[in-house]
Image: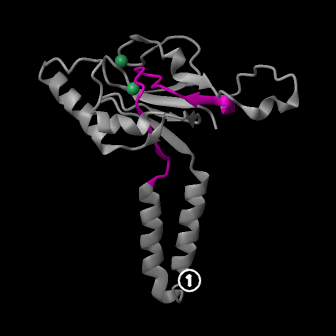
């Protein structure tokens, strides 16, 4: 699976998709603004035990990379979720339920199976908390500090986005999200 990041253009909000790791700044297809991705967003997996093979040459294979920050905006707070199209799963179950009386309810079992396979096949997507960035990173494993979605962190960024819309300065950058929210990300 090729590694990509999809995010809105910071200037014109056009949806963009870029391969990772990024080679060079590429102009936005709509507004032409050159957009450089944050090179430090990806980090080679540390403490890899794969050095058992001896002379481990530093190959830049994507499988050894992890997302530690948002490639689009550099935000350090990210969350991960299954890249599973929920709608497909719901549709499968609905169709199965409709067919159930005719198949002696075997279709429900089949639907559960399809659901499971879809879930297994789907990878993880890492999403930036920052609004309106919300960059989606696919094909790169999440870093150790990337946790599950946290509503309190999301609310914090929603509040920041609201303040930005109103032209108000956000809280001091060093303050960061509420402390209880941060605790999930502390190690
Ligand atoms: Zn643009
Ligand atoms: Zn971002």
State whether residue 7 is above or below residue 23: below
Image spot of residue 133 (x, y percent): 35, 28
Image spot of residue 61 (x, y percent): 71, 27
Q: Is residue 15 something one can see in this rendering?
A: no
Instruction: Judge: label 1 CB < 8 Å from ligand 2.
Output: no
Q: Quadrant of residue 24?
A: top right
Of the 4 image quadrants, the one containing the N terminus is top right
Q: Is 172 in front, or is 126? A: 172
Q: Ligand 1 sits in which quadrant? A: top left
User: Along the horizontal axis of the image, is 155 left or right of 128?
Assistant: left
Task: Report the coloring of the rendering.
Answer: one colour
State whether residue 84 is above or below residue 110: above
User: Along the horizontal axis of the image, is 73 left or right of 152?
Assistant: right
User: Along the horizontal axis of the image, is 171 left or right of 176?
Assistant: left
Q: Which residues are magenta?
A: 63-85
Q: Quadrant of residue 173?
A: top left
Q: Is 184 in front, or is 157? A: 184
Is residue 79 in the magenta section?
yes
Residue name at image x 40 percent, y 20 percent = 73
Image spot of residue 11 (x, y percent): 31, 16
Q: Quadrant of residue 30?
A: top left
Q: Which residue is mark 1?
A: 106
Is residue 175 in the magenta section?
no
């Amino acid at each position: 699976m090729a590694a990509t990041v999809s995010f809105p253009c910071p200037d014109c909000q056009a949806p963009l998709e870029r391969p990772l790791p990024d080679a060079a700044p590429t102009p936005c297809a709509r507004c032409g603004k050159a957009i450089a991705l944050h090179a430090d967003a990806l980090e080679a997996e540390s403490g890899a035990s794969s050095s058992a093979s001896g002379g481990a040459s530093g190959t830049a294979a994507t499988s050894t990379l992890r997302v530690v920050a948002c490639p689009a905006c550099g935000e350090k707070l990210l969350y991960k979720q299954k890249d599973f199209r929920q709608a497909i799963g719901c549709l499968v179950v609905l169709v199965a339920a409709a067919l159930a009386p005719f198949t002696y309810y075997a279709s429900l079992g089949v639907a559960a199976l399809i659901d499971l396979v879809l879930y297994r096949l789907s990878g993880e997507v890492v999403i930036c908390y920052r609004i309106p960035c919300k960059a989606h990173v696919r094909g790169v494993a999440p870093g150790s500090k990337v946790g599950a979605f946290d509503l309190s962190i999301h609310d914090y960024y929603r509040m920041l986005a609201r303040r930005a819309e109103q032209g108000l300065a956000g809280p001091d950058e060093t303050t960061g999200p509420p402390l209880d929210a941060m605790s999930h990300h502390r190690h």
